[in-house]
Image (cartoon, helix red, strand yellow):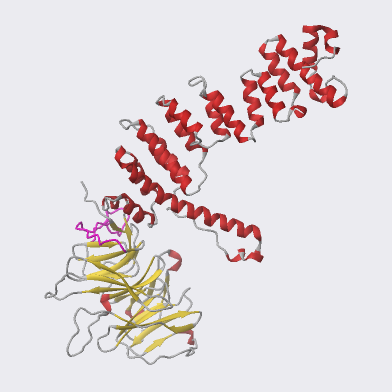
Amino acid sequence: MAEEHYLELSENPVQFEHASSVNNVFFDEANKQVFAVRSGGATGVVVKGPDDKSSVAFRMDDKGEVKCIKFSIGNKILAVQRTSKSVVFPDKRSLKLLKSQSINVNWYQYCPETAVILLSTTVQGNILQPFAFRNGTMSKMSKFEIELPVVPKPAKLSLSERDIAMATIYGQLYVMYLKHHSRTANSPSAEVVLYHLSREGSCKKSHVLKLNTTGKFALNIVDNLVVVHHQTRLCPEHPPAPVLLLHRPLVFPAGPAAVPSQPPVPCQLYSSSWSVFQPDIIISASEGYLWYLQVKLPPTVNLLQDKGKLMDFLLRRRECKMVILSVCSQSAYLTAGSLPVVATVFDKLNQVYKDYLEAEQSYTQAMESGPSRGSAAQKRPVRTQAVIDQSDMYTHVLSSFTERKGVSHKFIIAVLMEYIRSLNQFQITVQHYLYELVIKTLVQHNLFYMLHQFLQYHVLSDSKPLACLLLSLESTYPPAHQLSLDMLKRLSTANDEIIEVLLSKQQVLGALRFIRSVGGHDNASARKFLDAAQQTGDQMLFYTVFRSFQQRNQRLRGSPAFNPGEHCEEHVAHFKQLFGEQALMKPSTV
């Protein structure tokens, strides 16, 4: 049985010519491009990006060893650095000095996602000065100090570039510091200290992730998780939860085959040639692969026993929908004592669901109000996989749960009602198919007294589909017929449905009395009522209904006769056959 793992490398890595004595490999973090430069570019430069569209091949004159090479955004301008003090741009592009700063810099890091550069200053290197770039301008941000575990005497450079990383987590920029404690310290294990870097205001230490081990580390950000690489371990972290130290090794797909017919070539775990780049890239220059690190979400459900915390974790992941629905199913299958857990899970899901519905409603209202209200600038809300709606729950969780064997039917009902309770709490309109599922489950287990109570106290909201379902249950539960009629009457917009129900049950006089009570007799279809009365075979019933509509015609038009458009000729002939021509013209009151 394969060992369970939580992280893996992408199945289809970017392939490039591996590093050698004649081929140098460079990586551009902004464009996510790998440059393979052969013989200083004289025999070719091959650029591989995340997709085929960003791949480029060209040659350039060999003017010495290339120290760094990058494209501008869109591959419009190539920059080549061959010395420590000069950068060459092709096509003799002109440069303009926009702004200068006089700072002694030990090293720097740049975050392309946020266009922020971080400079290490002072002798110890732990005073960091960030600058932000926006719309061609550079702005100085508040500098901050990294707390060193030990202050050296005499002062010397103590903060290394490899111990600092910048990344965006949940839309916020963080500076991550790998803090190594001395062996004599009370806490000899290393830590990852997160500093929240705001464009406005001071930088503040926000989280400390304890690694509970020592050694050399590297950092990645995958799906808003801080991943700490160690030679034998991985520590994925979801701020601000406690660190999760994984003792299982990283397992990843085998490397791509050189020839399609050959079997894949396995790759060495944490090879010495591996290089880690932000946010989620691992490159093996010696093997010629660029991988994207990915979270394997399903196994992570076993990391957190607290289902509420687990749901918080899952709701923040990209590919979370089916995993969340699986967790919901597992939670629902527990014993009755787990109902509070089920309630917590439902509430967390419906909070996200409600937020999405409100955002969608706000967008719709803004669009309807026109550009004058600023709707042109408002973007339609993105429906992420974290939005679990009623259809998702019904299809993947609740409908199958009601059929599960070995679970108390009262607990099944309690779970269904808990979900409905949660929807009502967040003021989300409950779809009728959920009520139908409750009713069918009650009927299946002969819990008619509970069904009656749910309807009597309006636990199940009135709706036409629900009323029709109750009608269909009349043969199993006779009181369902009256419960259905009561519901339709409460709806007040279901008069036509009530008439149809009564006529289908051959309660023609009841339908006639009802339509009079709601003031609809004058516009009622005489043919519909006469059809129903004739089908009963009750001659006196037909006589009564026929006279009723004759009386209506007399009152409205001064004549008992039916208009040709009412198509009652067949019924007039039937009346004559039963009661004679004289009876047809005889005035009567009903």
Q: Position of residue 429 (x, y in %)?
A: 52, 44
Residue 534, relative to residue 369: is it above or below? above
Q: Report the front residue among 53 and 249.
A: 249
**Given the current orientation, which residue lies at the most extreme right position?**
558
Residue 418, relative to residue 298: is it above or below? above
Q: Is residue 184 left or right of residue 84?
A: left
Q: Report the front residue among 488 and 356.
A: 488
Which residue shows up at 73% across the image and 30% down it?
A: 519
Q: Quadrant of residue 422?
A: top left
Q: Assign the magenta stretch its main secondary structure.
A: loop
Q: Quadrant of residue 150?
A: bottom left
Is 262 included in the stretch rendered in magenta?
A: yes
Does the rendering let one see residue 33? no
Q: Quadrant of residue 218?
A: bottom left
Q: Give the extent of the magenta segment.
A: 240-268
Q: Report the front residue among 53 and 74.
A: 74
Q: How many marks?
A: 0
Q: Is residue 206 left or right of residue 491?
A: left
Q: Report the front residue among 376 and 65.
A: 376
Residue 160, relative to residue 521: is it above or below? below
Q: Position of residue 107 (x, y in %)?
A: 30, 84
Q: Is residue 244 left or right of residue 524?
A: left
Does the rendering let one see residue 487? yes
Is 124 included in the stretch rendered in magenta?
A: no
Q: Quadrant of the C terminus?
A: top right
Q: Position of residue 484 (x, y in %)?
A: 56, 28
Residue 446, relative to residue 63: is it above or below? above
Q: Position of residue 285 (x, y in %)?
A: 28, 70
